[in-house]
Image (cartoon, rainbow, N blue to C red):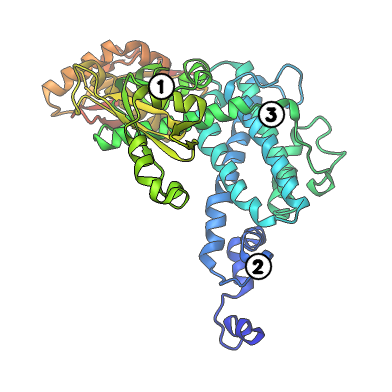
Amino acid sequence: DTFFYWYQMSKSLKNYPDPNEILNKYGADALRLYLINSPVVRAEPLRFKEDGVFQVLKELFLPWYNAYRFLVQNVKRVEEETGKKFNPLAPGQEPVNVLDRWIASATSSLVTFVKTEMEHYRLYTVVPKLVNFIGQLTNVYVRYNRSRLKGKNGDDDTNRALTSLFNVLLVLCKTMAPFTPFFTENMYQNLKLCLPDAGASEPSVHFCLFPEANADSVDARVEASVARMQSVIEVGRQIRERHNKPLKTPLKRMIVSCEDGEFLQDLQGELRAYVVEELNVRELECELDPLKFATIKAEPNFAVLGKRLGKAMGAVGKAVKEMSVADILAFQKSGEFVVGDTTLGLEDIVVKKEFSLPEGFTAETMDAATGEGDVMVVMELEITQSLLDSGAAREFVNRLQKLRKSAGLQASDTVSVFFEPAPGNAEDATQAMLRMLKTEQAYLLESLGSVPQAIAAKPADLNVVATGECSLSTGAEFIATLAAMKI
């Protein structure tokens, strides 16, 4: 056995990458996490792959760093705008927003998990959990709250969001310091500057005590509801893709059907804005009745029942398949269904839910799919002219935002927006764009900070900041101009 493992990684054969090259290319922390997550820590053989180290860097360190960089950028912006130093420990910045509370709860859950696993020497379970948490932090918290972190809802809300993100990253640094000592130390040295004593009492992350989970911040309901919300959003995207309905085109209505009243309450409340924004729908409805948009039927779980029942399987299986809707609902509530002398439990019967088209709709105008937790998502797919105009307005805003970025403008920079049809643009496309600019005026004002006007209306005392040719998927082509007051 010894010879076999020595032969697998042989210096003379040079059949493995040079460790120094791996360290120089990916860093020591990426290699550490790769090995911690490998069979080596379970005293099992490992076939070393350089791509595995790269995947750790790609899936964990880069998203983690991007969340940190986004925090730093917005803290600097707030400090420049207000002239005040960012203080994450200032009173009155407790999490109020549902996603602030969710990420605080998820962070406490992570700390508890890592501490428990380390106490039992199960280091290899930490990396998958960390990758999942980093994904949640970047793909959910930062992405869904980008506008809040950039100041859309005012100073108080921005400070609460930035404080929440700061606290998560600080706790994450302390939690992961034993695993990634160099990366966390580098990040901590900058984060500690926001603390009142600039980190003088704890000059290194390795001088800090391992964090304790904040029991007060743990909220199982919020964690469960946000997880289900993500499932709803993912299923909604799948329905759009199935019918070739891009996210830039708004849809009129979506319905979420679920028997969990608490989740539907959260979905119609604090989570509603996130679902509507991510799926670009105008209306979100919730339905507690599982049979309004679906039919249900029961089937025996042959994998479980086959060995247990033997010859009696046929009669029991037939009885299960003949269960009425009332029988199925009663079974789901009680957890039991009796066939003769046999009592079946929840693991013995599979209840399948199938979408049932409501009257007045076709497969082209409405579709549905089921996600985790037996949540059914129903989407109305018919596209009206009003919805097309809303989609064009989102595109228009996107083109102007790209122009702002290319001009080096900050989120706080106020400019006026002007436009003119590009030479040779089709008249019908121009008229469609003008109609859209009129009907979507309120949205454009909220998104751009000013109502787009014809270039002829530009006052002489405005300086042109940027200009560029733009086009929309409707076929409209135009020249956009950004202008600001002369200084």
Residue 351 lies, with reference to residue 442, above or below; the image says: below
Residue 407 can be seen, yes or no: no
Residue type beneath disc 3: Val
Q: Are marks 3 and 2 in contact (CB under 8 Å)?
A: no
Report how far apart the C-alphas of labels 1 and 3 lie in the structure.
Answer: 26 Å
- Within-10-Å neighbours for mark 2: few <14, some 14–19, many 20+: some
**Which residue has dot 2 on it?**
40
Say which mark, if any, is on residue 276: 1
Q: Is residue 439 above or below residue 77?
A: above
| Secondary structure at numbered mark 1 | helix
Q: Is label 2 or label 1 in front?
A: 2
Identify which residue is drawn at 40% across, 27% down: 328
Residue 339 in sight: yes
| SS at badge 3 | loop
Indicate the position of residue 74 as horizontal and vertical percent values: 60, 30
Circle 1 packing at 10 Å, graded few (<14), some (14-19), many (20+), is some
**Which image quadrant for residue 154?**
top right
The tag earlier along the polypeptide, 1 or 3, is: 3
Please tell me whether residue 32 is drawn above or below residue 47 in the rendered image: above
Instruction: Report, in whole angstroms, how far the alpha carbon at label 2 lies from the one at label 1.
Output: 46 Å
Amino acid of disc 1:
Val
Name the one closer to the observer, 475 or 314. Answer: 314
- In the rendered structure, the answer to whether residue 392 lies left or right of residue 262 reads left
- Earlier in the chain: of badge 3 and badge 2, it is 2
Task: State the residue position of label 3.
Answer: 218
Q: Nearer the viewer, mark 1 or mark 3?
A: 3
Q: Nearer the viewer, residue 437 or 409?
A: 437
The picture quadrant where one finds residue 223 is top right
Secondary structure at badge 2 equals helix
- Using the image as rendered, state which of residue 49 and residue 370 is in the foreground: 370
Q: Does 152 appear above or below 67?
A: above
Residue type, label 2: Val
